[in-house]
Image (cartoon, rainbow, N blue to C red):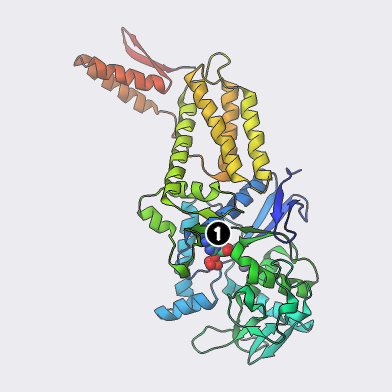
Amino acid sequence: MPQPVRLLNTLSRRLEEFQELEAGRVRLYTCGPTVYDFAHIGNLRTFLFEDVLRRTLTAFGYTVTQVMNLTDIDDKTIRGANAQGVSLREYTDRYVQAFFEDLAALGVERAEHYPRATEYVPQMIELVQRLQAKGHTYALEGSTYFRLATFPGYGKLSGVRLDEVKPGARVDADEYEKEDVRDFVLWKAHRPGEPFWDSPFGPGRPGWHLECSAMAMSLLGESIDIHCGGVDNIFPHHENEIAQSEAATGVPFARFWLHAEHLVVEGQKMAKSLGNFYTLRDLVAKGWDPQAIRYLLVSVPYRQKLNFTFEGLRGAAAALERIGNTVRRVAHTPVASGEGSLTLQEVEAAAVEFDAALADDLNTARALAALHTLLTRANQALDQNGIAAPVRARLEWFLDRVHRVLGVVPAVPAAPLEEDVEALIAARAAARASRDFARADAIRNELAQRGIVLEDTPHGTVWHRRS
Ligand code: AMP
Ligand code: ZN
């Protein structure tokens, strides 16, 4: 039985206990990047929230099947490819590759599927045909539109009102504002200079919203457990996905809708169009560690806005360094021979609090606080009587769990190598021979810190690990 987790469902506007459709399994659809440019760290915040969601569900005992689409055909990718005079595929390939590099640098776990929209056009056409057969569409000047008035549930996610829609008003753009609640385009008529596919509705290409519905249903089924994106996806993108999918199938499209708040800069959404953005590459080129960027982006609970500042990034780097130092110190300090100064109960309490924080709509700030409190105690214990073996084993188990869920525990370098110790012993002997006793003592102390005890015998220096 998986552990329970409560999630704030945008659809009900309430914190609900997560209930999966099929025991132990989670079908997760996460709207992916539009591959027309490098992702900025605002986009990456949303993808990291989805990574933490996925890792939490896995740690809690679910088997997750995640789909993240790659939007390789929409208004923006076509514009970009045409501006550079290259094919859509050549243009988007670059950014698909860059996207995967970014995910790897940030330690994001791979989803099970990364469908490209251009590879699911037959499924998109089929979905339009289903909608057409049920009377939800109309054609005009070669394009096919979804008639909002045929779907009474329109607005249930975003709160827009159907009775305010001007009958017959249409929108062709992929992105538009709430003031423009109108019949939206499913299939866009072919325009010169644009890639197109033949279809029963004439040559053209899919609209952005249609793409996600078709890929989600093809890979995960008509009803899925969780659908995610950033808050800007709520309207019109997700509202339109619900309309198309549910009008076609008659069953609920997704049970839970989760949306990450924006990364903001001086109060404004980080966005390409505003020019106030950083890509991961920009920050790495300035010398920032991707793991510190990950720490910063996951440290604020996803339902809160995250204000990006370099001061915040410095704070994240410092927090990460503190975790790394403590983890190394714990690993390389010999265990206490007695009871030590950290109790098993303290470690258990931190582990319980960590899970409770995540079960509370992924409260990552609270989860990290549990980690830091325990690390403070571990440092105090190491300054006193140390940490006993069973407590250390449990502490290491906890650190591993934290890392599996949040990905913010730096790896501990392997215990000192034998050759390394032998080399230091030789250096100490050389220092003693030249009467540099300060250097010789420094080497002995360094080894002692790593749990290596030296003993000078008539046959030379021997060493052992302190038990
Ligand atoms: P796009 O590549 O524009 O389709 O965006 C990819 C994802 O990033 C979507 O889920 C957006 O909702 C999300 N997103 C865009 N801007 C931001 C931002 N400033 N903060 C957080 N998420 C964002
Ligand atoms: Zn989508």
Image side of residue 306 versus residue 443, left or right: right
- The image quadrant where one finds ligand 2 is bottom right
Q: Is residue 215 visible?
A: no
- Mark 1: give few (<14), some (14-19) or many (20+) Cα within 10 Å: many
Nearest to the observer: residue 425 or residue 153: 153
Residue name at image x 65 percent, y 86 percent: 199
To which quarter of the image does residue 388 belong?
A: top right
Residue at the top extreme? 458
Q: Quick check: 305 above or below 162?
A: above
Residue name at image x 49 percent, y 53 percent: 104
Q: Quick check: 413 above or below 49?
A: above
Residue name at image x 50 percent, y 62 percent: 268
Q: Quick check: 455 above or below 379?
A: above
Residue 155: x %, y % from top left: 72, 71
Residue name at image x 51 percent, y 84 percent: 194
Mark 1 CB in 8 Å range of ligand 1?
yes
To which quarter of the image does residue 204 belong?
A: bottom right
Q: Amino acid at mark 1?
A: His
Residue 228: x %, y % from top left: 64, 60
Image side of residue 1 versus residue 394, left or right: right
Nearest to the observer: residue 11 or residue 54: 11
Residue 391: x %, y % from top left: 59, 24
- Residue that numbered label 1 is attached to: 262
